[in-house]
Amino acid sequence: MSTVEARHVWKIYGKDVIAVKDANFRCENEEFVAFLGPSGCGKSSTLRMLAGLEDITKGEMLFDGKVVNKLSPRERNIALAFESYALYPPLTVYDNIGFPLLAKGMAKKEIDRKVRGIAEDLELTEVLRRKPGKLSGGQQQRVSLARALVRDPSVLLLDEPLSHMDQRVRTVIRARIRRIHDELHTTTIYVTHDQEEAVALADKIIVMSMGLVQQVGTADDLYNTPANQFVAGFIGEPAMNFINGKVSGQNRVALNNGESPVSWAVEENIPEASVDASVLVGIRPENIKTSKDSVDSGIKAKVEVVEYLGEERILTLRLHGTTLKAVVPIDFLAKEFQDVWLTADPADIHVFDEKSGDALIKTGR
Ligand code: ADP
Ligand code: MG
């Protein structure tokens, strides 16, 4: 049983390396929460402060409502698995996994049952008698993960725990981690730079960039109503397109497409203060409607590259110095250098302030 909370937490290394800026978040009991963001955005620093491995420069971390800033890792009842393995080289895999249980004074028989169970889950049964030095990076990482999962912690902290595994194993182990989380009824905090992992695993995703929490929400929230341009561009594959424009009315944006100006309706009213503001109009590749003939309010773009993606095609398009991507059906036969016309449903159009990057409307699907 544990809730985890950060209140105005900062991490500053040395004098001026600001790794985490005023972070506020809350993880509910038994929730699976992912920290997602590009390399260097402060994810590991946040997790290490939760673990007690790094001092908190300012602010408070709380477990179950109690401040834990001064508690050692041991006193926090957490289990950790990091990108690096930190295994004991002289011990076998079996003993590495069983070590935390032995330290707790658990009976040998019970330890055996648990170690074999988790080894089965993480496909380590064959290597239980080996020493870590004889294993691949991916296997060593699974041992480290097994050692964290075998305990019964209040909080499970995992930092890129699949990074050294190959794609097939990664998908299998990912699903097992979620299952084990559900069985243990623990609160899990999982750090990753991989949106696919975060979306597959987490109940709630905390997106970070440049030391700042950008948005907290479900995968659907982040995809449908990104709070700013960073989140909009980071979540979704291929990434959202951005076109320069201007607010031209209460629910209209004019697109800078060079030739004859085109304006698009958006679904919600843009705040009055933003009329005439320079904006970035966001539209996801899967939401762009592409036509080979000129259409009303269509913006003209040139096809540059045609790629195949399973049952669909992805077009890379050129629009006055901007590159866009559009997903089209497989039977949409487009040739390079051909002109196409693009439109979008008002409900699929996002609008971001050019300066702050903040979303000016919340589109709703
Ligand atoms: P992430 O895990 O998202 O990649 P980190 O939390 O590891 O990000 O790092 C955030 C920032 O803090 C980076 O700029 C990184 O270089 C810096 N940093 C991390 N650890 C240290 C450290 N021990 N000393 C100085 N700077 C650090
Ligand atoms: Mg990291």
Image (cartoon, rainbow, N blue to C red):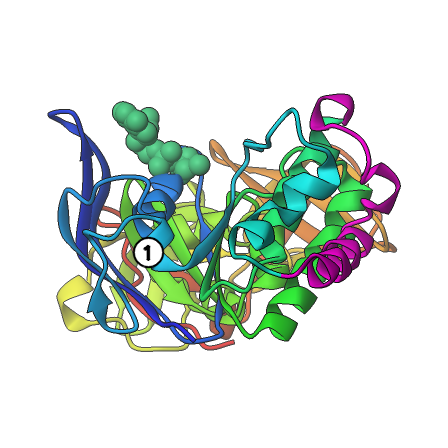
Magenta stretch: helix, strand or loop mostly? helix
Above-or-below relation of 137 to 147: above
What residue sits 74% from the left and 28% below the top?
Answer: 131
The one of 163 and 181 positioned closer to us in this rendering: 181
Above-or-below relation of 325 to 30: above
Assign the N terminus to one quadrant of the image: bottom left
- For badge 1, the amino acid type reads Glu
**Is disc 1's CB within 8 Å of ligand 1?**
no
Q: Which residue is label 1 attached to?
A: 75
Q: Is residue 49 left or right of residue 43?
A: left
Please rate how many residues cluster around mark 1, counting C-alpha atoms within 10 Å: few if below 14, some from 14 to 19, many from 20.
few
Above-or-below relation of 63 to 303: below
The one of 326 and 196 positioned closer to us in this rendering: 196
What residue sits 28% from the left and 42% below the top?
Answer: 211
Q: Quadrant of ligand 2?
A: top left
**Where does the image place residue 88, in percent across and percent down from the top left?**
59, 30
Q: What element carries label 1?
A: helix
Q: Which region shows up in magenta?
A: 107-135
The answer to whether residue 237 is visible is: no
